[in-house]
Image (tube, rainbow, N blue to C red):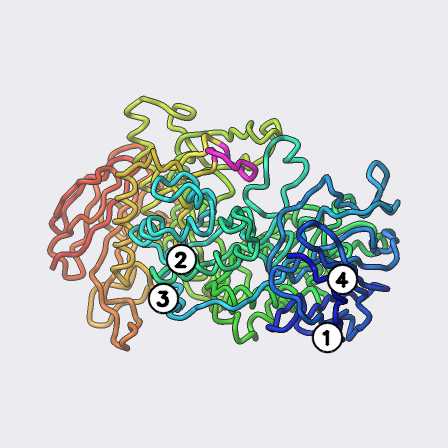
Amino acid sequence: MTLTKTPLKVRLGQPYPLGARYDGKGVNFALYSENAKGVELCLFDETGVETRVPVREQTAFVWHLYIDGLKPGQMYGYRVHGEYAPERGLRFNPNVVLLDPYARALSGTEQFDAGVFAYKMGKDDLTMETNDQRGAPLGVVIDDRFDWSGDHSPNVPFHKSVIYEAHVKGLTMTHPEVPEELRGTYAGLAHPAVVSYLKDLGITAIELMPVHAHLDDPFLLHKNLTNYWGYSTLNFFSPEVRYSAAFRAGDPVGAVTEFKEMVKALHAAGIEVILDVVYNHTAEGNHMGPTLSFKGIDNPTYYRLVAGDQRHYFDYTGTGNSLNVRHPQTLQLIMDSLRYWVTEMHVDGFRFDLASTLARGLHEVEQLSSFFTIIHQDPTLSHVKLIAEPWDVGEGGYQVGNFPVKWAEWNGIYRDDMRAFWKGEGGLASEIGYRLTGSSDLYKDDGRKPWASINFVTAHDGFTLRDTVSYNDKHNEANGENNQDGHNHNLSWNFGAEGPTTDPDIEALRSRQQRNLLATLFLSQGVPMLLGGDEMGRTQHGNNNAYCQDNEISWYDWSSVDEKLLEFTRRLIHLRQSHPALHRRKFFSGRPIRGTDIRDIMWLRHDGAEMTDEDWQNPGTQSLGVFLAGNGIADVGEDGQPLQDDHFLLLLSASSENLPFTVPDFGGCTAWELLLDTSNDEAQEVVAAGTETQLINRSLKLYRCVR
């Protein structure tokens, strides 16, 4: 839009809500800065002409004004005046146009050539830049109104959830049924072909990798790469315009509407939307990083600075800075952002990247930090799904099992134990017992339930499932870091050939191993999370850190789908969802069921006898059987009636030898009907109680009791 030539009618405005809010007659602007000496609102027209408006009113450190007649689409930024004294943590420079931390939409992406640094490039950060710096994207005023009529959150109970981790662009970029102009966008994800695929797969929630506006780091751009994953947040309110078909068509405000339409389409299919959010750091990096928003608005408020050396930043994230969650305003920023995405964008939950950083008090992780306390008391956020990545890179940052009630956690121990077991490492029987049953050793004692464990065998960070069984070593050469990046401890196995092979025996083993890992995932208590594309055999060609690969390495290859593996995964998810015994809300008790000869769970050796303490500790134990009593769920359904199900028998063997396994003759079962065999998708079998079945080397079987 072009600014009116008539003088602006400026009023005092209100200090809350923060950001730019359109009320139908004009726009209220409010910006928090505790240490600033002055603030100028900068209004820009479509040609880049700037009009500066002094913000004279300040209430409780909030600078605010109201301008009559401004409308949605207005672009704006701020110039903030104050001391430039990095050694004391102050980095004010009015030569830099800054992005409003509460902007709801952005004018575009960062432009490094237009200047994004508050210090003189080529010198240290103590020398202030005196030339105009306009490289940060501008905020854009939006109209929040949207027709949400008919939209309802699926509100799937956590214990019934099946999560699908995916990237907006990667999922849709090559989908043949999505129009080319919509590929890689929110609109592409909302396309009926994609929604139908997800619904048919049986997932209940899609966990989207970061969709907050992010930065493409200069060191990546210099290598013709980008920050594909998006874990470098620039703004916590605005959806990333790179994933917007509306933005591509010239409408930045349309990105907000497009995101809402995507959520509404997924909800209509019964699929929840969970956002992977990065509130632990921002894209501004360390003391030598750019000044785009927070750093130039109020550096000591928003960032953890080193005591006695406020020029530098605490870095618990490996990215150069950590947000100062101890400050009330920074905490409010995060809470306001979370509430915005729930109330205005209708998302259903959040996965918090490096969540241990948010819990830190001084230098330690505190379970009852202000962040968790406020969320638990919040009437909106206390009712959405809260998932922690329970670690960061700081000392004492690995906190799996230590987050408070109401929180679920990415269970990295589950991933490692299951990979090690199926790889054939011995001595893991007791660990596998815990992982199959919801990791009670991690979550039961603090009052949480099995759903606190988000089980996964692969995630965006690491090998895909196909690559886990195809590569012994990472192959990250395309990242331009001499293959030094990414994890080295992958617990992967190539079965004799690194990468693609035509050897039928190796391919058969790889196929079986993929099914073993998937079957274990979906037949374990807790909440399964499937890495998007694993169900179709997606490969990243051995790259286990594809954070910078916005290309065929990361995108789904819809022209090369392993249809048999896809159908196997659908069957697994359907089995899990159809049987309450496979997704219990409560931990097993191990106690006898009244009036029967069984317990709610029983552990069996391959000869049919119950596991002994010696068996659990034996490093040679590579197989076990699990009996699940369908009449031992000890819970009620939504109708208030006791839950009843079939008895199930799960047999697992990571041995390199075929193994005879005696099936139980208790529980009133006369025979056992085969439901699943990872060595043969077409297998059919009914085994008389007390007799043997053959378990092929490195395979899994699931049976149902026949009475």
Towards the viewer: 541 or 121: 121
User: Mark 4 and mark 1 in contact (Cβ < 8 Å)?
Assistant: no
Q: Earlier in the sequence, mark 3 or mark 2?
A: 2
Q: Please give the count of numbered marks on the rendered protein.
A: 4
Mark linked to residue 154: none
Question: Range of the magenta residues?
Answer: 543-553
Tag 1 residue: 13
Answer yes or no: do the residues labelled 1 and 3 have beta carbons within 8 Å? no
The residue lying at 18 percent from left, 48 percent from top is 674
On the image, which quarter does residue 502 sit in?
Answer: top left
Mark sitting earlier along the chain (1/3): 1
From the viewer's perspective, is 265 left or right of 565?
right
As for residue 357 lying within the magenta part, the answer is no
Residue annotated with mark 2: 205
Residue 290 percent location from the top left of the image: 74, 46
Give the residue type at disc 3.
Arg
> Crowding at label 2, few (<14), some or many (≥20) Cα neighbours within 10 Å?
many
Query: In the image, residue 157 lies at what x, y percent?
Result: 38, 66
Q: Identify the residue at horizontal 20%, vertical 49% (top origin).
A: 675
* Residues at circles 3 and 4 in contact by the CB criterion of under 8 Å: no
Which residue is pictured at 28% across the width and 35% down the height?
697
Three-letter code for the amino acid on which mark 4 is drawn: Leu
Answer with left or right where residue 503 lies relative to residue 647: right
Sequence-wise first label, 3 or 4: 4
Label placed on residue 585: 3
Q: Nearer the viewer, mark 3 or mark 2?
A: 2
Which badge, 4 or 2, comes first in the chain's sequence? 4
Question: How far apart are labels 3 and 2 at the CA level?
Answer: 18 Å
Name the N-terminal-most of marks 2 and 1: 1
- Disc 4 to disc 2: CB gap under 8 Å: no
Residue type at the position of mark 1: Gly
Give the SS element for disc 2. Answer: strand
